Image: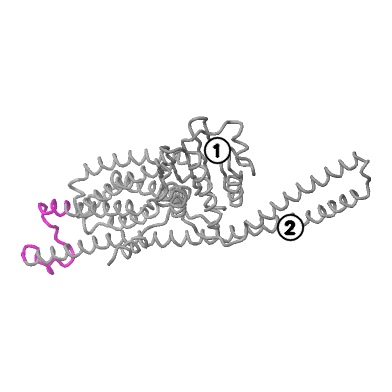
């Protein structure tokens, strides 16, 4: 099996990128809306059974032996959960990273408590085993990060295994209770009969541990399928919306340009005809006619640019990987064979949401900004590229150089067409960048300090909805 096949298999078992808002909604549903009521009901029931009933005293387990320590352990667990309820009550005031790590801690605490309950409620006969399966399903929703989710569920399985081992080790010193029904069917003093009981218990133990491991794999597998299906549906909606958005923009621009060009042409022809009828001595009238024709020419140029704007919407929308496109653009702008003397340092996350754009538009945006940074830099300078994922799936792309920078009074003009600070510049590069970004709801801004370089910050909204 070659490396490419291994990489393909790993991608199949890798969850898609879950944006922070979706993750926050999942945690809110599972830990606050569903988890808090369920825990309140469970804690109330356990408090009644431990302190106000004789249920544990009748269970053929360690309930009669370790009831005191169990009550103390439950008191500590109850205190932790009261703190957790207060924490989740202020859910909207905490950042996602705090909520997520707190949920991880509470998952481990819940696993420890369930393990203690297994010890005192019959070991293999305890119904608490089924709660472990529920805990794993909860982890699949609250902990979408694959390695972390699998690790937490394996820890829960380990807790159950250790609990059974402790319960059986302690029960080895406790005389077995003889069943009241049909006590003659089994000789409890016979070594052969005891060995049969132990073999049956071992088989049941192995089977239950196997189901815990199987549940771990199934939960992760179902989450992978669910997340990929959700991502595919979202990308399909985004693709259709982007395509229709570009088509509508192009049709509107073309229609406006077409409707205005005809009246301008009539005005221009009329001015030309009047120019022939007016004698050369009527200088004021000739001057005004010339002004009309100049303004008509400027307006026609604007409409021509508007029609060019409409052509920008022509083409197919694709699912683009920003990291891949960025790496190709860097190799194009800073080829290995060219000796620019400029180092390129980049920091790009491995997993970013895809962009629904035309490849030509994205390539023009990236290349123009990189070329601008390269031309502003001198030998020995560094160009830094940073990409970060912001809220609601917005990607921030920052390109910084160590050039001379741009004066504050020129910052607002830098994106205007035909405006340039370079001797041989056309003034169209950054105007094209802004124009392409506006088609997709993106933005670009400039941060610069004279003598310390400039930084262009571009935002790509990966989702329109």
Q: Residue at x 52, y 40 (%)?
A: 456
Q: Residue extending furthest front?
A: 280
Q: Residue at x 61, y 43 (%)?
A: 427
Q: In terms of depth relative to the viewer, which is nearer, 9 or 54?
A: 9
**Quarter of the figure with residue 131:** bottom left
Query: Which label was assigned to residue 370?
Result: none
Residue span colored magenta: 166-191
Residue 454 is left or right of residue 87, and the answer is right
Q: Residue at x 27, y 59 (%)?
A: 212
Using a 10 Å C-alpha cutoff, classify the residue at mark 2 as few (fewer than 14 neighbours), some (14 to 19) or many (20 or more).
Answer: some
Q: Against 66, is 8 above or below? A: below
Residue 11 in view here: yes
Q: CA distance from mark 1 to mark 2?
A: 33 Å
In the rendered view, how is the structure colored?
one colour
Q: In terms of depth relative to the viewer, which is nearer, 195 or 11?
A: 11
* Residue 278 percent coordinates (x, y): 93, 46
Quarter of the figure that contains the N terminus: bottom left
Query: Which label was assigned to residue 446?
Result: 1
Residue 348 within the magenta-colored segment of the rendering: no
Query: Which label was assigned to residue 255?
Result: 2
Magenta: predominant secondary structure element? loop
Earlier residue among tags 1 and 2: 2
Using a 10 Å C-alpha cutoff, classify the residue at mark 1 as few (fewer than 14 neighbours), some (14 to 19) or many (20 or more).
Answer: some
Q: Identify the element where label 1 is drawn.
A: strand
Residue 19 is left or right of residue 12, and the answer is right
Residue 174 within the magenta-colored segment of the rendering: yes
Total numbered badges shown on the rendered structure: 2
């Amino acid at each position: 099996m070659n490396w490419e096949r291994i990489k393909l298999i790993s991608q199949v078992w890798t969850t898609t990128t879950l944006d922070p808002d979706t993750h926050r909604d999942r945690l809110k549903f599972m830990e606050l809306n569903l988890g808090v009521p369920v825990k309140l009901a469970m804690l109330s029931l356990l408090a009644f059974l431990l302190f106000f009933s004789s249920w544990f005293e009748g269970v053929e387990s360690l309930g009669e032996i370790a009831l005191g320590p169990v009550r103390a352990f439950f008191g500590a667990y109850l205190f932790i959960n009261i703190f957790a309820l207060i924490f989740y009550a202020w859910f909207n005031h905490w950042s996602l990273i705090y909520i997520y790590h707190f949920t991880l801690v509470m998952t481990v605490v819940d696993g420890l408590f369930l393990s203690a309950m297994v010890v005192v409620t019959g070991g293999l006969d305890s119904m608490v085993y089924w709660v472990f399966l529920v805990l794993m399903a909860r982890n699949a929703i609250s902990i979408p990060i694959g390695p972390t989710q699998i690790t937490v569920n394996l820890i829960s399985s380990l807790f159950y295994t250790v609990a059974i081992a402790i319960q059986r080790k302690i029960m080895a010193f406790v005389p077995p209770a003889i069943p009241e029904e049909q006590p003659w069917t089994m000789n409890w003093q016979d070594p052969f009969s005891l060995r049969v009981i132990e073999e049956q218990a071992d088989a049941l133990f192995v089977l239950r541990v196997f189901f815990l491991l199987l549940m771990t794999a199934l939960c992760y597998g179902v989450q992978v399928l669910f997340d990929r299906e959700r991502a595919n549906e979202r990308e399909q909606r985004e693709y259709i919306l982007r395509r229709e958005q570009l088509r509508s923009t192009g049709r509107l621009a073309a229609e406006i340009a077409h409707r205005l060009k005809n009246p301008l042409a009539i005005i221009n022809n009329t001015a030309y005809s009047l120019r022939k009828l007016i004698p050369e001595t009527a200088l004021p009238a000739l001057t005004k006619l010339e002004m009309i024709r100049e303004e008509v020419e400027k307006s026609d140029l604007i409409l021509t640019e508007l029609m060019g704007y409409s052509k920008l919407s022509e083409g197919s929308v694709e699912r683009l990987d920003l990291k891949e496109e960025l790496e190709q653009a860097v190799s194009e702008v800073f080829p290995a064979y060219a000796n620019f003397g400029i180092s390129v340092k980049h920091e790009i996350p491995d997993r970013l949401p895809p962009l629904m754009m035309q490849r030509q538009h994205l390539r023009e945006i990236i290349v123009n900004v990189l070329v601008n940074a390269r031309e502003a830099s001198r030998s020995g300078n560094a160009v830094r590229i940073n990409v970060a994922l912001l809220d609601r799936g917005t990607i921030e792309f920052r390109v910084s150089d160590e050039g001379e920078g741009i004066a504050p009074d020129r910052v607002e003009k830098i994106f205007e067409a035909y405006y340039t600070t370079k001797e041989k510049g056309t003034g169209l590069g950054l105007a094209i960048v802004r124009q392409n970004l506006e088609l997709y709801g993106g933005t670009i801004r400039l941060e610069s300090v004279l003598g310390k370089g400039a930084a262009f910050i571009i935002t790509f909204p990966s989702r329109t909805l």
